[in-house]
Amino acid sequence: MIELSVQNLKKSFEVGEILLDGLTFEIQTGECVGIMGRNGCGKTTLFRMLTGELEPDDGVIVFAPGRKIGLISQIPVYPEGYTVENVLRSAYRDLFAMKKRMEALEHQMTVSSDKAILSEYDRLTNAYEVGGGYDMDMNVDKICNGLGIPAAMRDRFFTQLSGGEKTRVNLARLLLENTDILLLDEPTNHLDLKSVEWLESYIKQFKGTTLTISHDRYFLDQVVDRIIEIRDGRAEHYNGNYSFYLEEKQARFNLQLKQYEQEQAKISQLSYTVERMKGWGINNRVLYRRAMAMQHRLERIRKTERPRTEKTLKARFGEKEFFGDAVFSVKDLSKRFGEKTLFSDVELHVEGGERIAILGDNGTGKTTFLRCLLGEEPVDAGRIRFGPTVKTAYLPQVMQFAHPERTLYDTMLYELNCTPQAARDRLGAFLFSGEDVFKTVGTLSGGEQSRLRLCMLMDEKINLLILDEPTNHLDIASREWVECAIEEYEGTLLFVSHDRYFVDKFATRIWELEDGQIKDYPCGYAKYRSLKENAAVRPIPQTAKPEKKEKPRAKVDSKALEKEVRRLEREIEKQEQRISELDEQLQAAATDYQELLRLTAEREAADADLNDLMAQWESAAEQLV
């Protein structure tokens, strides 16, 4: 069944500048469709027209009858004084109105037994139950648990939240509304990895229809059935996920280029023949008529448009030669904010050429750790030591420029002390051309500011590049430009990112910041995920401090001890298998709050039992030595 039909949609905001030019597509019931395209191509404008916020200049939008539509907007706005709980509960405004009416009817029934009152009350009771009125609290808790919205946040005013927290709360509100069609505009922005994975699981099990605008390539691979790319105001259709889209798009480009080249060769050959025959036909009418017939044939040949390649960023990081082995080392590093310990007793060692991703939930201290490394944030304990030839460059998550009133051109001249031509060349390499260079820095979008900061960093001779969420605010093409520059960079790379595609592409080592500790996984993202899911191998522990030697023990029965060690090893193996099974059950129950609570408690108890068995095994094994 067709859930949504968009036919010949047109929209312009300025005279002569057409944003959408005949956009046409259909969405079937239950599909999850990714909407892609460069920043500014009209994706968000399309969503605003689907919700009725904007009117198209021309074209038709038709939804299946009775469908309820929900939109997660990039800038949520709620009444002054709304707490997070108020925002979440606003998803049930119809049910609250229904309950209020039921309470009024209950009061009337105490003094009257009118059949009309009883009939209305019975109808409302059924509607309230079917609408989920009796499950409101459970559903709110389940969604908040999945998206990482703690109880303390639910009491805060919505206006006091950060941009990322607002996005999460607004997404939770939308999911609670139980809509038929979800419109998700960059839903993974500001979500940590656990929340993104939970959202993926929710969408996969969602029985309704989903349209999502996203630059998260890993997310698109996981959830979408097909992709609609908006290009030159029209829709191009790809019947698969992001990986399929990449291959199919390249195949279409190659086919169109081949057709274009064949047509051009044919046109060239016919044009040459026509001109020769016209010359021969000056005194020969038969030849001249043939030449004119060929000319008409030439004009009727279907002209294939030459496929256009996207502009690419042509730049690379300047590199400073690195001497020695150690880039930096961290020993006994600790950092607190008030009573909260972000990390403690951290010991790490980094060698030249490593590519390290720092992963962890929002608020665990990843950015703070980077700032401590750079000396921008004081530490409470421990030391950080860099190699003598290390030169660092840092791309922060939030861009700040000393003079936002300056143009891009002036910023390059003043801050890099380069020549006017060098400033133009550098900006051009990062796709700032023409009048773009005279925009003021303060008017740039987040993605453009990231590109400008990268442009400024490229000039520096560095061997340690530190990036904090480098792909935030960038469309897919811009992310690929950044990746091209990083691929050619041969120095040491340390970065924080929730972009799993980016992490999978570059990380050769993972640092996981969790519960105040940094666990070191000397592997790429795919193996890291496998280790986390299967719990097959524990991460390399932090270097333990030497323990004091114990006094010699008395002789013990070695045979009995060997038997006990073997028994404990069998028990440990069984317990590890049990934990692996629980991990699989936890993943399958991602959207069931009550089951999650039960399984989480069981998982914690199993971990405790395993730790106890390991302690017994270590004690028995030591006595055998």
Image (cartoon, helix red, strand yellow):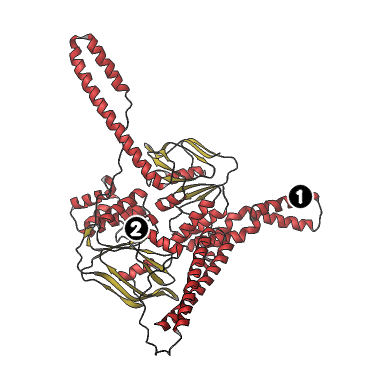
Residue 295 horizontal side relative to residue 336, left or right: left
Mark toward the viewer: 2 or 1: 2
SS category of the residue bearing label 1? helix
The label shown at residue 470 is 2
Element assignment for label 2 = loop
Q: Is residue 150 above or below residue 425?
A: below
The correct choice, above or below, for 608 with respect to 209 in the image is: below
Q: Nearer the viewer, residue 519 or 40?
A: 519
In the picture, the quarter occupied by the C terminus is: bottom left
Residue 5, percent across and down?
51, 38
> Could you tell whether 528 is left or right of 5 in the image?
left
Q: Quadrant of residue 531?
A: bottom left
- Determine the residue positioned at 27% across, 50% down: 430
Q: Residues within 10 Å of mark 2 (few under 14, many from 20)?
A: many
86 vs 227, left or right, is right
Image quadrant holding the N terminus, namely top right
Instruction: Report the residue that reaches farthest toward the front.
Output: 559
Q: What's the residue type where badge 2 is placed?
A: Pro
Contact (Cβ within 8 Å) of mark 2 with mark 1: no
Residue 306, image x and y in percent? 30, 34
Q: Earlier in the sequence, mark 2 or mark 1?
A: 1
Q: Is residue 149 visible?
A: no
Q: Amino acid at mark 1?
A: Ser
- Residue 119 is marked as 1
Q: Which mark is residue 278?
A: none
Closer to the camera, 30 or 282? 30
Residue at mark 2 to residue at mark 1: CA–CA distance: 60 Å
Query: Which residue is found at the position 31% from the left and 57% from the top?
Result: 404
